[in-house]
């Protein structure tokens, strides 16, 4: 199988052209095999390129544990660079179908090279039944008990569920495991530990549902920026500092934009 390995701020993916649907129904098994960091190529997940009549292309995301993900911000940027560079879709404005619906993407070019990818995610949703959570109230500054301590959480749906926790001191990211699988989240949640640096910068560490701790999480960074803005901590445009680099998030009336890029690590063939 031919593949490209790519990353967005250290969040890495195996990208596969599956427009002929060779792996339809076998996505989970494939992801677990090729994402294994000792017995496979190694990655946080796989991205499958599929045809879609309503969009320029369709992105299917499977986490490294074989579970399905509706949306992934860093993954989408990798996907965009892949389909553009390989000539599958050669446009500066694209519509990409994801499990979270159509995503509008704008590309800035220097010559024929992508210099910036801007993705529109829509609005964050705090409604409990949409996330989903087992509690009827919105989880904004909501206290939960885990790891023998109390956490003040803010949870929203932004493509996938995200739980944002603001801390003044660095927190062990592994604490997020108990929050990810907390009983109030029937489908689990991504967890983002955040620190506000100033009105234009925040720091975020991410634990992704189905992938574990990652060097970056696109939708998670957007969720952290939204939570910080909604609480009055930051301005509408912020830089989010993550272990894998820096992303820019812009919050407008119509919704959230993420601005960044993606990189190719390698390409080749793997025996499956």
Image (cartoon, rainbow, N blue to C red):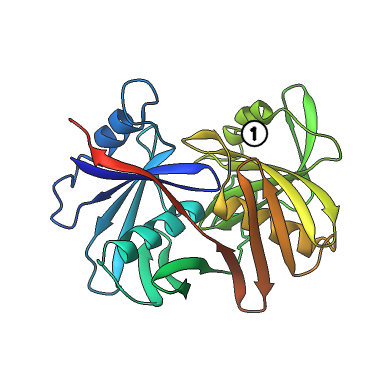
| Residue in view at x 78 percent, y 56 percent | 201
Q: Is residue 163 above or below residue 251?
A: above
Q: Is residue 22 above or below residue 149?
A: below
- Horizontal arrangement in the rendering, residue 48 relative to residue 237 (left or right): left
Residue 254 spot, x, y in % from top left: 61, 78
Tell me the crowding category of disc 1: few under 14, some 14 to 19, or many 20 or more residues within 10 angstroms, Cα based: many
| Residue in view at x 25 percent, y 33 percent | 29
| Residue in view at x 29 percent, y 72 percent | 56
Q: Is residue 153 above or below residue 147?
A: below
Q: Where on the picture, by quarter, is residue 97? A: bottom left
Using the rendered image of the protein, determine whether residue 137 is visible from the camera's viewpoint: no
Quadrant location of the C terminus in the rendered image: top left
Q: Where on the picture, by quarter, is residue 269? A: top left
- Horizontal arrangement in the rendering, residue 29 relative to residue 9 (left or right): left
In the image, farthest residue toward the front:
111
Residue 142 spot, x, y in % from top left: 77, 46
- Horizontal arrangement in the rendering, residue 25 relative to residue 174 (left or right): left
Looking at this view, is 189 or 31 the one in front?
Answer: 31
Q: Is residue 246 above or below residue 232?
A: above
Q: How many marks?
A: 1
Looking at this view, is 14 or 23 the one in front?
Answer: 14
Residue 265 spot, x, y in % from top left: 41, 43
Q: Where on the picture, by quarter, is residue 199? A: bottom right
Which residue is disc 1 drawn over? Answer: 179
- Horizontal arrangement in the rendering, residue 262 relative to residue 38 (left or right): right
Using the rendered image of the protein, determine whether residue 53 is visible from the camera's viewpoint: yes
Quadrant location of the N terminus in the rendered image: top left
| Residue in view at x 42 percent, y 67 percent | 113
Question: SS for tag 1?
Answer: helix
Residue 245 spot, x, y in % from top left: 63, 47
Looking at this view, is 124 or 8 the one in front?
Answer: 8
């Amino acid at each position: 199988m031919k593949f490209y390995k790519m990353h967005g701020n250290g969040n890495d993916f195996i990208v596969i052209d599956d427009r002929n649907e060779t792996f339809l129904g076998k996505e989970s098994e494939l992801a677990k095999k090729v994402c294994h960091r000792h017995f496979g190529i190694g990655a946080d997940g796989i991205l499958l390129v599929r045809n879609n009549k309503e969009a320029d292309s369709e992105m299917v995301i499977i986490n490294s544990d074989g579970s399905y993900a509706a949306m992934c911000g860093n993954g989408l940027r990798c996907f965009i660079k892949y389909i553009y560079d390989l000539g599958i879709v050669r446009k500066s404005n694209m519509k990409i179908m994801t499990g979270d619906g159509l995503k509008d993407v704008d590309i800035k070019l220097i010559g024929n090279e992508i210099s910036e990818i801007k993705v529109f995610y829509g609005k964050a949703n705090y409604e409990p039944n949409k996330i989903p959570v087992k509690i009827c109230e919105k989880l904004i500054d909501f206290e939960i008990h885990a790891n023998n301590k109390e956490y003040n959480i803010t949870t929203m749906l932004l493509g996938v569920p995200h739980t944002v926790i603001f801390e003044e001191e660095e927190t062990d990211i592994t604490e997020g495991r108990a929050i990810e699988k907390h009983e109030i989240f029937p489908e689990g949640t991504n967890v983002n530990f955040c620190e506000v640096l100033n009105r234009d910068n925040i720091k975020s560490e991410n634990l992704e549902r189905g992938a574990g701790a990652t060097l970056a999480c696109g939708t998670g960074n957007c969720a952290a920026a939204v939570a910080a803005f909604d609480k009055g901590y930051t301005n509408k445009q912020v830089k989010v500092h993550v272990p894998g680099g820096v992303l820019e998030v812009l919050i407008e009336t119509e919704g959230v934009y993420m601005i960044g890029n993606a990189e190719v690590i390698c390409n080749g063939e793997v025996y499956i």
